[in-house]
C-alpha cells in the first residue's frame, strides 16, 4: 500500500518514555496504557508497535501529544514503509 | 585461473574445500600462512562489483538476524547514488554477547586475516572512508597482532566491546563507537542511511566478513558450491551443553541438527532438546532433530540459525528449569531503557520459574502468554521480542512438561 500523504506516523521512543501517560489522555482513541503505565497502540502492525498510524482528522491532537510529552518521547513523521 | 570482470574475482586451484573454508588455515593464524592458504587478494581492483557478487552469492549475515549481506551493502550504494551523502563507514562486529557462542572469538583467533580482508574489501566496494573492528578485549589482541603483520590494515580502528548480551546489537555497536555507550538506540531511519556520525553505516558480523573475503577471491559460484540453493555456503556453529566437549564447527548450509550433533559425538538418545539460535532462539525437541539448520527449515518452529548456537540439554534435564534460568538471565541483561522490557522480562522470568518449580496454578500459563503480548515490538531493540519468542518456544516444545508441572510432577527429572 502506498503511503497516504494525509496520514502520519506517531513514533514512540521507548528509551525516553517513562509512562507518564499524558499522551494516552490526549489521544485515547489511538493509545491506551499497559499494566505498567506505558502507551500501547490500539491499532498497529504486531511487529511495529513503536509506530502508530495517525489519520488526518487526529493529526492536531497527535501534534499536541508530541508537544506536551514531558520526556520528548514522541515524534510525528511521514508514514513509514515497513 | 579465470578472471571475471575487473573485480579480481577468480577461481583458484587453491580455493579451500567445501567443508573447511573459514577454517582452512586453522593450523597457523599468521599472515604468511594465510596468504599460502587462500592466495593474495588484490584490493586495488575491488569496486562496487563486489556488492553484485555478494548478492549473487546469497550470503546472509552470520551475526543473528540473517539479513542478506549484499542487500545491506546495496542500500549504501543506492543511498549515495540518490544524491550527495557523506562517505560511508564499515564496522566489523565481533561482539559475541550470546553466552553459548564461541564462534566469533574462535574465528578471530584462528583466521584474523580473513576478517581483516573482508573488512578491507567491503570498505573498497562501498568507497567507505572509515573502518572499525569492534570485539572483546581478548579478540582485539588477536586482531592487533594480525594488523601488525601487514601494511594495508593500519586504517582499521579497534574498539572494545563490553561483555553484555546487547552490546552487539547494531545500534548499540554504533552508539558504543560514537559515544562509548554500548546500549541500543531509538532509530527512525536505517543505519545504512544514517549511522555512525550520520554517515551511511554497514555493520557486518565478522564471520560474514570472512565469507566476503573468500567471495572476493573465488566468486559467488564457488561460495554456492557448499550448502544448498536455499542456504548456500558454510556457517560456523557452536555446540555446547550436554555433550562431551564444547565445539565450534564449520558446517555446510542446510545441514541437519542431527548431523551436526553426530559430528560432535553426541548420542541422540541422550538428547532431551536442542536450543537453536541462542537465547533469542527456539527449542527443537528430539523428534525434530532432522531439521536442517537454515532459516527456511527452522521457520515453522519459530527458530532461526541466528549466530549458529546449538545448546543441547540431556534427556533427564528439565527444560522448564533451564528455560526459566535463561529468561532470568535475559531479564538481567535488559538495558533497562525501555519500560515494557525493563518490567516485562523480570515478570516473565518469575512466572516461568513458578511453573518450573511446580506451582499448581494453570493461570500462570495465560499470564505468561499475556506478558509476551505486552513486550513484543515495544522496545528500541529486539531484546523483548527475542525473549518473548524464546518463552513461546519453551511453552510449545515443553507443553507436556508444563502440564505435568501443573500436577506437581516433572516428566524429565522425576521430581520437582
Image (cartoon, rainbow, N blue to C red):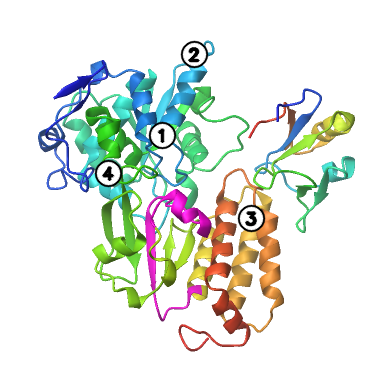
Residue on which disc 4 sits: B226
- Residue B81 is tagged as 2
Instruction: Say which label, 3 or 1, has the lower sequence index.
Output: 1
Q: Residue at x 34, y 42 (%)?
A: B232
Q: Does the stretch in magenta take in B293?
A: yes
Quarter assignment of residue B348: bottom right
Q: Is residue A40 left or right of residue B186?
A: right
Instruction: Say which label, 2 or 1, has the lower sequence index.
Output: 1
Q: Residue furthest front?
A: B229
Residue on which disc 1 sits: B69
Instruction: Work out whether B229 lies above or below B152.
Output: below
Question: Residue A15: x and y, percent?
Answer: 65, 43
Element class at badge 1: helix
Instruction: Say which label, 4 or 3, has the lower sequence index.
Output: 4
Residue on which disc 3 sits: B342
Q: Is residue B350 left or right of residue B26?
A: right
Element class at badge 2: helix
In depth, the one of B47 and A20 nearer the eye is B47
- Residue B215 is tagged as none
Circles 3, 2 touching at the beta carbon (< 8 Å): no
Amino acid at each position: 500500500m502506498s503511503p497516504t500523504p494525509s496520514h502520519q506516523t506517531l513514533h514512540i521512543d521507548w528509551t525516553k518514555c517513562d509512562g507518564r501517560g499524558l499522551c494516552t489522555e490526549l489521544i485515547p482513541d489511538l493509545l491506551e496504557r499497559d499494566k505498567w503505565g506505558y502507551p500501547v497502540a490500539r491499532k498497529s502492525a504486531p511487529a511495529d508497535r513503536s509506530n502508530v498510524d495517525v489519520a488526518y482528522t487526529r493529526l492536531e491532537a497527535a501534534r499536541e501529544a508530541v508537544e506536551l510529552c514531558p520526556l520528548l518521547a514522541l515524534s510525528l513523521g511521514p508514514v513509514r514503509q515497513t | 585461473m579465470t578472471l571475471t570482470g575487473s573485480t579480481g574475482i577468480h577461481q583458484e586451484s587453491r580455493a579451500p574445500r567445501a567443508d573447511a573454508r573459514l577454517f582452512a588455515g586453522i593450523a597457523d593464524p599468521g599472515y604468511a600462512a594465510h596468504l599460502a592458504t587462500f592466495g593474495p587478494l588484490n584490493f586495488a581492483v575491488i569496486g562496487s562489483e563486489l556488492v553484485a557478487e555478494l548478492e549473487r552469492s546469497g550470503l546472509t549475515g552470520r551475526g543473528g538476524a540473517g539479513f542478506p549481506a549484499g542487500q545491506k551493502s546495496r542500500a549504501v550504494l543506492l543511498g549515495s547514488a540518490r544524491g550527495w551523502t557523506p562517505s560511508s563507514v564499515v564496522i566489523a562486529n565481533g561482539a559475541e554477547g550470546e553466552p553459548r557462542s564461541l564462534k566469533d572469538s574462535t574465528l578471530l583467533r584462528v583466521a584474523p586475516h580473513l576478517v581483516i580482508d573482508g573488512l578491507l574489501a567491503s570498505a573498497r566496494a562501498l568507497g567507505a572512508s572509515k573502518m572499525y573492528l569492534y570485539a572483546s578485549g581478548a579478540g582485539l589482541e588477536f586482531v592487533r597482532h594480525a594488523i601488525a603483520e601487514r601494511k594495508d590494515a593500519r586504517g582499521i580502528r579497534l574498539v572494545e566491546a563490553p561483555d553484555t548480551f546487547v552490546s552487539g546489537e547494531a545500534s548499540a555497536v554504533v552508539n558504543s563507537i560514537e559515544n562509548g555507550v554500548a546500549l541500543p538506540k531509538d532509530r527512525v531511519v536505517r543505519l545504512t542511511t544514517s549511522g555512525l556520525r550520520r554517515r551511511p553505516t554497514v555493520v557486518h558480523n565478522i564471520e560474514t566478513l570472512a565469507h566476503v573475503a573468500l567471495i572476493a577471491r573465488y566468486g559467488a559460484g564457488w561460495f554456492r558450491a557448499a550448502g544448498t540453493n536455499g542456504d548456500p555456503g558454510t556457517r560456523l556453529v557452536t555446540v555446547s551443553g550436554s555433550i562431551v566437549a564444547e565445539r565450534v564447527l564449520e558446517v555446510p548450509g542446510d545441514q541437519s541438527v542431527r548431523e551436526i550433533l553426530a559430528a560432535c559425538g553426541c548420542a541422540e538418545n541422550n538428547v532431551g532438546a536442542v536450543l537453536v539460535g541462542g537465547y533469542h532462539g527456539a527449542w527443537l525437541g528430539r523428534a525434530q532433530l532432522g531439521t536442517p539448520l537454515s532459516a527456511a527449515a527452522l521457520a515453522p518452529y519459530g527458530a532461526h540459525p541466528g549466530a549458529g548456537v546449538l545448546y543441547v540439554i540431556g534427556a533427564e534435564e528439565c527444560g522448564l528449569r533451564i528455560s526459566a534460568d535463561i529468561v532470568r538471565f535475559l531479564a538481567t541483561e535488559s538495558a533497562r531503557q525501555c519500560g515494557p522490557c525493563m518490567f516485562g522480562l523480570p515478570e516473565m522470568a518469575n512466572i516461568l520459574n513458578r511453573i518450573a518449580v511446580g506451582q499448581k496454578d494453570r493461570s500462570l500459563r495465560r499470564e505468561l502468554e499475556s506478558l509476551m503480548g505486552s513486550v513484543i515490538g515495544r522496545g528500541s531493540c529486539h531484546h523483548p521480542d527475542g525473549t518473548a519468542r524464546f518463552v513461546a518456544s519453551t511453552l510449545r516444545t515443553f507443553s507436556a512438561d508444563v502440564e505435568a508441572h501443573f500436577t506437581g510432577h516433572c516428566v524429565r527429572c522425576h521430581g520437582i
